[in-house]
Amino acid sequence: MHTLQARLFPFLIALAVLVVPPSQAQNRDTDELGGALSSIGQQYADNYTQPITDALGANLNAGLFRTAEVGGEGIVPVIDLYVGVAGMGALTSGSKTAFRLSGEDIPTDDGTLTITYPDEDLPTVFGEETSPGQAIISDNDPLTPDETVDLPPGLLNTSIAPLAVPQIGAGTVLGTDAQVRFLPETSISDYGSVSLFGLSVRHSLSQYIPLSPVNLAVQGTWQSLSLSGSDDSINSGEIVDASGWALNAQVSKSVPVAPITFYGGLQYEQFGVDVGYTFQTSAGTSTVSFEQDASNNVRALAGVSVTLAVIQLNVDYALASNNTVSAGVGITL
């Protein structure tokens, strides 16, 4: 049998689309999740997982700010400290659910394998939750019989792909503050480990405009995500290396008689994923790698935040290739 021992898909499920109800998730063991890509080649895997990359990029570049005011939003004048969690959900209504692929060749240590796929629509991870049939795998040796393998169905039928990220913000120095997103290397059951780091730096523009009726600021963000296989996996090292950056312009206006702030912004962003895994077959072993870019490049967002004593709540909606809802809760001092 042809086995791809990579833990790519379980990782992305756990991080980018945490939408399977707990009772259902418990019915999916490691082999089933890891086997979702066990019999497909690079081109199939690229098409199959692209919606995950789109959702992950849309989510990680969301929830980066709650106001354009730099300094003065805490209970201590000029000095701010924010500790909270941002929850983001990429809407999947525009995600690709199917693709067409006739076949592909996979080079191995002992030759080339030819995979022939059914001549019909093939589901992505967000596609039909039934298998499109079987693929035929041939080592191009007339003395060796071809193998047939079941192709993976779509695994998630969801309208929103959520993600939650802890973040800490501090400032201000010369009208500048910073925000950090950080998740230390964390084991995810038998799937392996994940780590995340992000840094945002924001600078006030309204400080240069006397009597400005609104707060204005610009912000730059860089984030990195690493996924590694479990120790007992053939892919025990790094499988996914993802990173992205975003630049935005922010505006906000506080209501004088209430602890409410309306905010919005325009953002340019990029997010890319480098994937590498070992495709192991009875005929040989092949190292497979490919790159993916998330579909979001530009987003426009609007939202509202409410501060009750030291508790700050916010929610916003962003228009982009993958529209995104973001909400946050935190303590501001």
Image: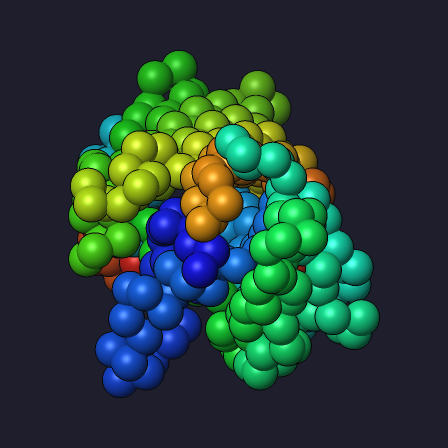
Toward the viewer: 17 or 129? 129
Toward the viewer: 324 or 256? 324
Q: In the rendered image, which quarter is residue 145 located in? A: bottom right
User: Which residue is at a point 31% across and 26% down the rendered structure image?
Assistant: 171
Q: How many marks?
A: 0
User: Would you say 226 lies left or right of 281 here?
Assistant: left
The correct choice, above or below, for 319 with respect to 277 in the image is: below
Q: Is residue 181 visible?
A: no
User: Which residue is at a point 50% across and 45% down the rendered structure image?
Assistant: 283
Q: Position of residue 92 (x, y in %)?
A: 61, 68
User: Would you say 73 lies left or right of 110 here?
Assistant: left
Q: In the rendered image, which quarter is residue 190 located in? A: bottom left
Looking at the image, which residue sits at the far front? 143
- Which quadrant of the rendered structure holds the N terminus? bottom left
- Which quadrant of the rendered structure holds the C terminus? top left
Q: Position of residue 324 (x, y in %)?
A: 57, 60
Toward the viewer: 279 or 44? 279
Q: Position of residue 132 (x, y in %)?
A: 65, 77
Q: Position of residue 115 (x, y in %)?
A: 67, 55
User: Would you say 173 lies left or right of 183 here?
Assistant: right
Toward the viewer: 82 or 50? 50
User: Would you say 126 lies left or right of 75 here?
Assistant: right
